């Protein structure tokens, strides 16, 4: 069962690499990876229920920050393509 979870995470990472140009697809793949790691932790019962709740809260905060970055990039550059965005030039 553990091999299947690691295969799912690996598949999501490979899909993430293939969708690196579109910011929304990048965010969706990261969220799938977060959810699969949560299921992995729940399946093997690593922690108590409060830690799962804190993990979910932090993942929601990460998703909100990602969407706000996407909206600000959309307003600033007019598109959501990552290949044209250079964060080193402020």
Image (cartoon, rainbow, N blue to C red):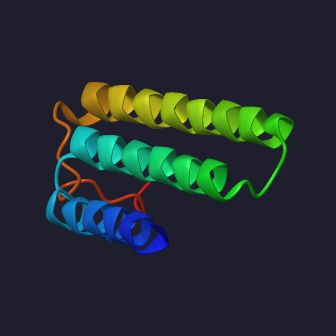
In percent of the image, x 26 and y 38: which residue is there?
24
Please tell me in which quadrant of the rendered image residue 16 appears: bottom left
Residue situated in front as seen by the camera: 14 or 44: 44
Determine the residue located farthest toward the bottom in the rendered image. 3
Count of marks placed on residues: 0
In percent of the image, x 26 and y 66: which residue is there?
11
In percent of the image, x 76 and y 58: which residue is there?
46
Please tell me in which quadrant of the rendered image residue 77 appears: top left
Residue 2 % position (x, y): 48, 70
Residue 8 % position (x, y): 33, 62
Determine the residue located farthest toward the front in the rendered image. 1
Residue situated in front as seen by the camera: 57 or 68: 57
Residue situated in front as seen by the camera: 63 or 83: 63
**In what quadrant of the picture does the N terminus appear?**
bottom left
Question: Where 15 falls versus 60 (above or below)?
Answer: below
In percent of the image, x 32 and y 40: which residue is there?
28
Question: Where 21 falls versus 54 (above or below)?
Answer: below
Residue 87 % position (x, y): 40, 58
Question: Where 55 falls versus 72 (above or below)?
Answer: below
Please tell me in which quadrant of the rendered image residue 60 appears: top right
**In screen coordinates, is 67 left or right of 62?**
left
Residue situated in front as seen by the camera: 20 or 3: 3
């Amino acid at each position: 069962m553990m091999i299947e979870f690691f295969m799912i995470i690996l598949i999501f990472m490979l899909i993430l690499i293939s969708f690196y140009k579109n910011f929304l697809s990048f965010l969706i793949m990261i969220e799938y990876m977060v959810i699969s790691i949560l299921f992995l932790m729940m399946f093997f019962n690593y922690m108590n229920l409060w830690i799962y709740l804190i993990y979910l809260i932090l993942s929601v905060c990460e998703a909100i920050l990602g969407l706000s970055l996407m909206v600000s990039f959309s307003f600033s550059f007019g598109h959501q393509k990552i290949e044209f965005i250079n964060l080193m030039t402020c």
